Amino acid sequence: MKTHATDHTHRHPRRVDARPVAAHIQHLTAQRPALPVAGIAQRAGIAPSTLKSLLADAQRRPGTARTVSSTTAARLLALTPDDLPQQDRGYGGRSTDATAAMHHVQKLLAAHPHLSQAALARTAGISLTTLAAALRDVDAGKPRRMQKAAAQRLLALGSHTPLPGHATPRSDTTDAQPVINHIRALQQRYDGATTAFIAHTAQVNPSTLASALTDHHRNTRRRINKDVAQRVLAVHDLPPPAFLRHDHVTVTGLQRRLRGMCAAGWTLSAIAQAGATTPKTLTDFAKLRTSTPAVRGAILTAWSRLSHRPGPSPQARRRAAAKSWSPPLAWDEHTIDHPDATPNGTRIPGCPQRWDPVLLQHELAFFTRLGLSRPECFRRLGISTHRARELLTTPPP
């Protein structure tokens, strides 16, 4: 039995508390802010994903007793600042501070509107992704290093290396302005319609679309890929969590819509699914009556999808009826958000109703859609059959 236990321990290395390890690595990264986590992992001989996960857990859940294998812990704890690449030498002495090269590129872009980041990257023989990331970091004041050779090629642009000239518009590109106008129109119609969300809906790369819009903002002659443009222009309606703007929606109106859907036979789970939210979110709203853009969008989206048809839950209908919640047809869209509005088919207790032919026809149409017979309608409205027939046969003025 002892031999078996020893073999089991050998196959599964002992695990230790990860918190001292994470604290040690955080200390090292504080001394080398420009050094990627992958570089530390490489020096320790462990997978970068393991170290990134360890640090992420330490930041998200400080104090949590996560464990790590004793071998991994020993390798990471053995690292000292002297073991890491020096900032002045970079990796093997092949990198340099990117600030000078990026400032040079920024001056070129400002002085030559026809130039694009892509054209400069091609001329310097580096990837557009590398150049864009370096420009972004330097502009934000973050430390950034790049290969010396690439930095030298960028610094040579405009002096030793001629700048690219005006490019002939490519046949696979088109004017970007209609795309920009379309995106702005969607953002005016919908709350939560970010450029990235529109890109995802159009099934295009968000960074590709954002880059094209940035280039066009800097130079209105810049064009956009035809396929990207066609995909974006084909988007006319956005799914949740984006939702149509309603400037006059009130908390009272949202509550009436939520209760109305329950009265129509829809459970909170079904309403939440239709509105791309959770039942807990709707329950919290019903209790606290606190509206957020996300809650407003969820209820309005569910209302547009469910209010016009009956739900499958008799239990939801019974509960709503016990609480005297009015169904969707009891409300008009132009009055449902008014706090003083009353639902169709109801009367204020103690206040006699002054009936006229138009009002009676309106109420009868409402109850008929609910499936009530004429005598049932009259009883619900508190009007005699004789008086109702008199009104209904009265010729219009």
Image (cartoon, rainbow, N blue to C red):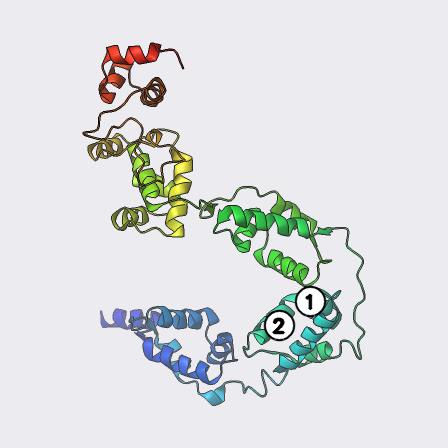
Which residue is rendered at x = 59% and y = 87% of the image? Answer: 89
Q: Amino acid at mark 1?
A: Gln
State the SS at label 2. Answer: helix
> Which quadrant of the rendered structure holds the C terminus?
top left
How far apart are the two marked residues, 1 and 2, measured between alpha carbons? 10 Å
Q: Is residue 249 above or below residue 325?
A: below
> Which quadrant of the rendered structure holds the N terminus?
bottom left
Q: Is residue 66 above or below residue 348?
A: below
Q: Which mark is residue 135?
A: 2
Where is residue 176 shown, x and y percent of the image?
68, 52
386 or 31: which is nearer to us? 386
Does the residue at mark 1 contact the one at mark 2 (Cβ under 8 Å)? yes
Q: Which mark is residue 191?
A: none
95 or 319: which is nearer to us? 319
Q: Which residue is mark 1?
A: 117
Label 1 Cα neighbours within 10 Å, binned few <14 / some 14-19 / many ≥20: many
State the SS at label 1. Answer: helix
